[in-house]
């Protein structure tokens, strides 16, 4: 039960965090400034939170056998691989053009997180 609550709470945190980071990315893009080390740190934290969310989801799937639709697992996997893939796609450059790529990817991931939460709530009405 504790892991399930942390998993659900982290989902809300990820949704808000990805939206905030996308907003920061748009600010960097429209100001035409370079990506700062603080942004990279926030980006790394976001990647780490997705990794933790994935591990918690695996613990739930293997341990308690929660009944969620298969697409929920697809959303979780997509969340883990998309941000590092965007970093690889941009080759880690920190110009304002890459900030737009991160902004769009983060908005996409925020939508994925919102959809993953809906699929979990439909399967687990108590959360």
Image: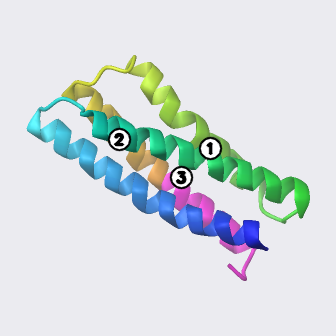
Residue range of the region highlighted in magenta in the rendering: 111-127
Q: Quadrant of residue 67?
A: bottom right
Residue ID for mark 1: 51
Q: Are marks 1 and 3 in contact (CB under 8 Å)?
A: no
Mark 3 Cα-neighbour bin, 10 Å: few <14, some 14–19, many ≥20: some
Which numbered marker is on residue 104?
2
Label 1 to label 3, Cα distance in Å?
Answer: 15 Å
Residue 75 visible in image? no
> Does dot 3 land on a helix, a strand or a loop?
helix
Residue 72 on the magenta span = no
* Labels 1, 2: front one: 1
Q: Is residue 69 above or below residue 73?
A: below
Q: Is residue 11 visible in the rendered structure shown here?
A: yes
Residue 7: assigned label: none
- In the rendered view, tell whether residue 38 sits above or below residue 126: above
User: Residue 66 appears at what percent x and percent y?
Assistant: 84, 65
Gap between marks 1 and 2, in whole Å?
20 Å
Q: State the residue position of label 3.
A: 112
N-term mark: 1 or 3: 1
Secondary structure, mark 2, is helix
């Amino acid at each position: 039960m504790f892991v399930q609550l942390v998993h659900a709470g982290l989902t809300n945190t990820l949704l808000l965090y990805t939206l905030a980071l996308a907003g920061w990315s748009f600010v960097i893009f429209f100001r035409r400034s370079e990506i700062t080390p603080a942004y990279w740190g926030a980006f790394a934290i976001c990647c780490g939170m997705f990794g933790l969310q994935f591990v918690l989801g695996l613990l739930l799937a293997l341990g308690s056998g929660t009944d969620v639709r298969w697409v929920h697992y697809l959303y979780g996997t997509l969340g883990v691989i998309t941000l590092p893939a965007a970093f690889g796609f941009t080759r880690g450059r920190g110009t304002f053009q890459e900030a737009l790529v991160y902004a769009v990817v983060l908005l996409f991931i925020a939508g994925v997180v919102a959809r993953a939460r809906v699929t979990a709530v439909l399967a687990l009405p108590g959360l």
